[in-house]
Image (cartoon, rainbow, N blue to C red):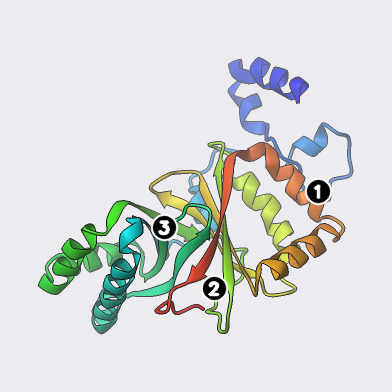
Amino acid sequence: MLKLRNLLAVGKGNNNAVRSLSTTPSCNDSESWFSKLLVRKIEPTKESHSRMLSDKEIIYALHTHNVRPDSMGSYLNNYKNTVALINEKKANLSTELVASWTVQVGDMDQCLHLWKYTGGFEKIDQAKDDLWNDPEYLSLMQERSKFLRSRHLQYLLAFSYWPQIASRTGKNIYEMRSYRLTPGTMIEWGNNWARAINYRQHNNEAFAGFFSQIGRLYNVHHIWCYKSLQDRKETREAAWRSPGWDECVAYTVPLIRDMHCRVLAPTEFSPSQ
């Protein structure tokens, strides 16, 4: 790693050298140790990285709400009514709720709501104009503000190599693993995870994979679905026993600046249970 840093420092004066260096190897490269650090050359392109990795016609909005500890019941009832109102106007809004969760392990007194917009940012603009001129919606928003400590919104794109999002039934828990990547490494992340995801589809645990488009940038969210914490433990241990999984994971570690996970439980009004 020290040698790589020195090479990168030397290459700062040479733009071509910097562009051709990457920090992650492909999983199946069997050449020298240094060649394993070269996944691909990131050349100048007329196409954005987000276009390479995803379909920009479908945008996901992740709403993170930090709720007052004494107001969770009132907050959930308010949001349930908000979802019902939006569902009534669904034909005009081109949006739908994918899932809603409360955090069980991690950032407590927190709720996450994942919405899907079909038709790109144009539909988000239209939905915002429609809702912000609806007195009932504004009334629910004003009421909800009494129950909140803070909130955050991210617009996300789904990685094209992840399985299509499908609602789950029965009793499940979800794990959201969130990563903050070093700027400039999203292509390399996708290059490795396009292989790694193949090791995690046997039990249908892969729910969704996103990267941020607006909001906190270079954020990645992987969402997994399990029957229980014990099922999570057994599934993850099985993945580590699969030849190749450990290499794919190890190669993404240098790309991560920080990470955290949250265990989530679906709300009663969540379409995915």
Count of labels shown?
3
Of pointers 2 and 1, the one earlier in the residue sequence: 2
Q: Is residue 226 left or right of residue 214?
A: right
Q: Is residue 42 visible?
A: no
Residue at horizontal 75 percent and vertical 67 percent from the top: 235
Which amino acid is tagged 1? Glu
Asked if one can make out residue 112 in the rendered structure from this viewpoint, the answer is yes
Residue at left offset 74%, top offset 24%: 4
Q: Is residue 46 above or below residue 79?
A: above
Frontmost residue, 243 versus 109: 109
Give the spatial CA distance, label 1 vs label 3: 34 Å
Q: For numbered disc 3, what is the local secondary structure?
A: strand
Inspect the image, locate mark 2, and give the three-letter code of the amino acid beneath it: Ile
Is residue 210 rendered to the left or right of residue 68?
A: right
Callout in the foreground (2, 3) = 3
| 71 sits left or right of 224 in the view | left
At which x and y percent is residue 202? 75, 73
Q: Quadrant of the N terminus?
A: top right
Q: Residues within 10 Å of mark 1 (few under 14, many from 20)?
A: some
Which x, y percent locates residue 269?
39, 79
Any mark on residue 247, and which? 1
Q: Tag 1, which secondary structure?
A: helix
Q: Which residue is mark 2?
A: 165
Taking the spot 77% from the left edge, 20% from the top edge, the residue there is 3
Lower sequence index among marks 1 and 3 = 3
Secondary structure of the residue carrying tag 2 is loop
Given contact means CB atoms under 8 Å apart, are the residues at marks 2 and 3 in contact?
Answer: no
Give the residue at mark 3.
110
Q: Residue at x 41, y 57 (%)?
A: 109
Sequence order check: which comes first, mark 2 or mark 3?
A: 3
